[in-house]
Image: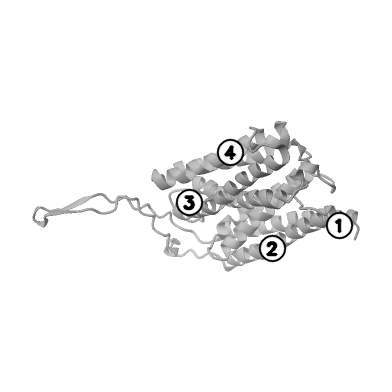
Amino acid sequence: MSAEQLAEVSDLFVVVTVLLYLFSMIAFALELAFGRVRANAPAVPARRPVAVGAGSGGASIEPAEPAEPAEPADSAEPAGVEPPRWAAMAGVAGLALGWLGMAANLAAILTRGLAVERWPWGNMYEFVVAICFAAVAAFLLTQLRYNVRFLGAFVMVAAALGLGFAALLLYTSAGPVVPALDSYWVAIHVSAAILASGLFVVAAASGGLYLVRGDGLSRLPSRADLERVAHRAIVVAFPLWTFAVIAGALWADKAWGRYWGWDPKEVWSFITWVAYAAYLHARATGGWRGRPATIIQLVAFACLMFNLVGVNILISGLHSYADV
């Protein structure tokens, strides 16, 4: 195929991916709407030092760290109410459609790369397409080990909207990039940023559900499970984002002769790093759990989104070459 034909095939794969993600989202939403009802497991209060007795010659000090909330039990299903079997089947169909959509998403990226004969994330359109793939891949690969199907509807709709936004407002015809982007650092710096961003999307979806999850029975998992999923995703994503920032500084030195120049993209990448570091620090050393920690990570995600979209569209800088 010629480069023009490969580019057209890539665009077609993007359309197919959007449709598959939307169908997957509908299937997951049906399972979530009609599936099993769960209780919100209460948090176990922190244990305090307790004196054993005057004759014991001392005191028994129990750990003061707050314990993890108990796991929700399937027995939280209201008596006499059984979810229909088709609801679980809808969840399985959502997974199958999700895997097909991810394969189509990957095909769109590969054919775009073959059309332009370079790493296919040299502009905002290509970058967003890759982030959508990373977000869905992070969700589906996590599902292989943990049951996180409750996130499916939200991750899929985010990926579908992201691809639609990229195709309608950010689309750039296949072609070469400016010399500053024609470097092996694209495969290092941008790839790490894409992987981290995909994981941050999964964490944000879980954090958003945490905030809307009520205290009583719900078809969502317990808040403890939602917070645990978000925390694990960020623990993996944060080192990747750290590496991306460092690799970006090394690339800047090679391209522009300095490691740091307070360009808007550099500044907001660092702000995003600080925000996620604050979340991890507060949760690890301050003992923050629940709503405060979730709000911090969602603020960090907002910084990430502004760095991705707002900086490129609203603020001019050295990174404005991304064809926006």
Label 4 and label 3: CA atoms lie apart by: 24 Å
| Amino acid residing under circle 1 | Leu
Residue 97, label in figure: 2
Crowd tier of the residue under label 3, counting other residues whose Cα lies within 10 Å: few below 14, some 14–19, many 20 or above: many
Do the residues bearing badges 4 and 1 touch, measured as CB atoms within 8 Å?
Answer: no
| Amino acid residing under circle 2 | Leu
Camera-side residue: 295 or 28?
A: 295
SS for dot 2: helix
Label 2 and label 3: CA atoms lie apart by: 26 Å
Q: Can residue 155 be seen in this view?
A: yes
Label 4 and label 2: CA atoms lie apart by: 36 Å
Do the residues bearing badges 2 and 3 touch, measured as CB atoms within 8 Å?
Answer: no
- Quarter of the figure with the C terminus: top right
Counting residues from the start of the chain, the first of labels 4 and 1 encountered is 1
Residue 141 figure quarter: bottom right
Give the residue at mark 3.
Answer: 227
Residue 82: image location, x then y, percent: 50, 65
| Amino acid residing under circle 4 | Phe
Residue 6, label in figure: 1
SS for dot 4: helix
